[in-house]
Image: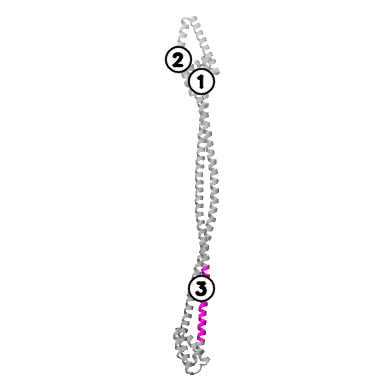
Amino acid sequence: MKTLVTIAIVLCLLTHPVVCKKHFNDEEHSAFEKSHKKLSLQDDPSYGKLEEIQDHPLGSKILQTIALQLRGNESLSAVSKLLNDLKGDLEGKQIDADNERAQIGSQCKKDLQNYSQRISLSINEIKDAEFKAKRLNEAIAVYQAEINEKARQIKVFQAKDDTLRDIRRQDNLDFSTRTTQMKEMVQAFEVILPKLHQVWDVAAQHKAGSFIEEEAINEALVQLAKIGEENPITAMVALTSTLEPTAVQTLIEKMEAIRDSIKESIQAEEEAEAKNARDTDTILAAIFNAMESLTREKSSDEEALQETIRNRDIQDKRSRDAHAEFNAAKNGNQQRNQQCQEYELQYQQNTIERDKQIAIIKDVQNIIATKIEVVTCFVEENNLF
């Protein structure tokens, strides 16, 4: 293009030197003025502002819209209306965002306060439940110790009861053995004495013989004792048949004394046995009453223990539920707090971006209203046509 212009100038100078020189000077002057004006416009602060605006997505779209209007030689009133509408829409969105922020902020505050209250209540619940469970566990230990001690005492009393009954049975068996033997002796005397009386009566009628010597009677009694271990009655009968009739009187007297002594011994044994039985029954009754009292107390302690265990389990469940509530409230508080912070961050970012877009629109409006030539120059230089 420059080559053609140069050729035209040369031809013009050759054919019409004066006219061509004047024309060339005019064009050169015009080009200089345009260049100087462009440089002047580019040095204008608004031009730099437009460069900043173009770097923003919204600003770039606005400038492209303005370029379309300028290319069609159309009025920028439509652009101005568009910018006003866009600015109004952004300002309306900011108002809505502010109102929404106020509502969400209030709800966040309520939610966080609710979570904080739940956390506080669950902590108090945990402390109370654990304190009561601790006291109940102490009571359980006391009940268990008392129950074990009463069980031990019952066992001791039962052992004493068994021992006394064994002793009583053995004493009664020994008593029966002794009294049976003594009764058999008495029975033997009751059999032999009537016969001895008969012998004595016959001897007295016939005045025959004399009493046997004391040594003979004692010997007879010794023989009676030896034989009588197997069968006292048979022994007495056998002994009586060997005596002289005249010795029977002395024997009768001694036998009767022995018989009466044995009867007294039997009576004494029976009285002692009865007293022993009564004393043993008294002791056994006392042991029984003590065992009954301990058994009732032990049963009452066992019922109280079970009730205490149930109450302890209730407190343990309260503690578990309170821990679950604490964890749920704590997690909910963290999640809700994060949501509120994220919303606030997004609100701040949107507000900053929206304020920036509104500022861009205001800057464009101001430049269009005051520096339309700068806008035209910027559009041309950046090939936005």
Which callout, 3 or 1, points to the residue nearer the camera?
Answer: 3
Which one is earlier in the sequence, the residue at label 3 or at label 1? 3
137 up-or-down from 269: above or below? above
Which callout, 3 or 2, points to the residue nearer the camera?
Answer: 3
Task: Report the Cα–Cα distance between label 3 and label 2.
Answer: 143 Å
Residue 360 percent coordinates (x, y): 52, 21
Query: Residue 267 in magenta?
Result: yes
- Residue drawn 53% across and 40% down? 119
Please give the label number shown on residue 274. 3
Q: Give the magenta-colored segment's residue range.
A: 254-282
Residue 234 percent coordinates (x, y): 44, 85
Label 3's element? helix
Residue 49 percent coordinates (x, y): 53, 20
Which callout, 1 or 2, points to the residue nearer the camera?
Answer: 1
- Residue drawn 51% across and 84% down? 258
Q: Nearer the viewer, residue 228 or 139?
A: 228
Q: The N terminus appears in which quarter of the rendering?
A: top left
Query: Residue 28 in magenta?
Result: no
Q: The C terminus appears in which quarter of the rendering?
A: top left
Residue type beneath disc 2: Arg
Label 2's element? helix
Residue 267 visible in rendering: yes
335 up-or-down from 277: above or below? above
Q: Nearer the viewer, residue 271 or 113?
A: 271
Residue wearing tag 2: 71
Which one is earlier in the sequence, the residue at label 3 or at label 2? 2
167 up-or-down from 243: above or below? above
Residue type beneath disc 1: Ile
- Kindly indicate whether the residue at mark 2 contacts the one at mark 3 (C-beta within 8 angstroms): no
Which one is earlier in the sequence, the residue at label 1 or at label 2? 2
Please give the label number shown on residue 361. 1
Circle 1 packing at 10 Å, graded few (<14), some (14-19), many (20+), is many
